[in-house]
Amino acid sequence: MTVGAPPKTFISDLRPGRVATFEATVAHLEAARDVEQRTGATTRVRRGTLRDGTGEITLVLWGREVDLVGEGDSVRIVEGWVKDYKGRPEVSLGRTGKLEKR
């Protein structure tokens, strides 16, 4: 480990209500679908599953994000927003998060 490097975060460490940076593999992606926003505009949304050696978490991509990855891609989520959805944690990029293909 490099001196000064932050500790590695794993999916099993993720908790709702926090931002997180971690690496994982895109295990599954559903087809993108159109949803109506509160403003009346329509945007695309796509759900998927991220997996690492410690577990899985649902990934939600919005708008232009839906075409960023494919199944089997290795990714790094930087400052992704973890929230609770129907009793299970899920991660999205929120306003400031980034998705990097590895």
Image (tube, helix red, strand yellow):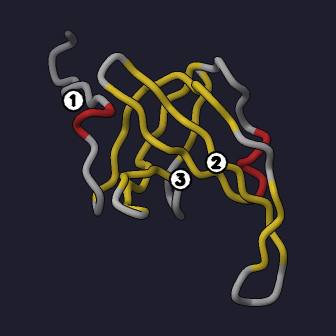
Secondary structure under tag 1 reads: loop
Q: Nearer the viewer, residue 95 or 83?
A: 83
Task: Please report whichever mark, 1 or 2, sits nearer to the chain's N-terminal start.
Answer: 1
Q: Which mark is residue 93?
A: 3
Q: Quadrant of the C terminus?
A: top right
Which residue is located at x 80 percent, y 50 percent?
Answer: 32
Which residue is at a point 15% across and 16% down the rendered structure image?
A: 3
Q: Kindly report which numbered mark, 2 or 3, lies closer to the viewer in this rendering.
A: 2
Q: Position of residue 36 (x, y in %)?
A: 78, 78
Which residue is the site of mark 1?
6
Residues packed near mark 2 inside 10 Å, few (<14), some (14 to 19) or many (20 plus): some
- Mark found first going from the N terminus, 2 or 3: 2
Percent position (x, y) of residue 41? 83, 81
Q: Is residue 48 left or right of residue 7?
A: right
* Residue under label 2: 47
Q: In which image quadrant can residue 18 be found?
A: bottom left
Callout 1–callout 3 Cβ contact below 8 Å: no
Check whether the beta carbons of the residues at disc 2 and disc 3 lie within 8 A of each other. Answer: no
* Residue 55 location (% of width, % of height): 34, 27
How far, Cα to Cα, is label 1 from label 2? 29 Å
Is 55 left, or right, of 44 in this rendering? Answer: left
Question: Please, what is the three-letter code of the amino acid marked with disc 2?
Answer: Arg
Q: Could you tell me the amino acid type at mark 3?
A: Leu
Tag 3's secondary structure? loop
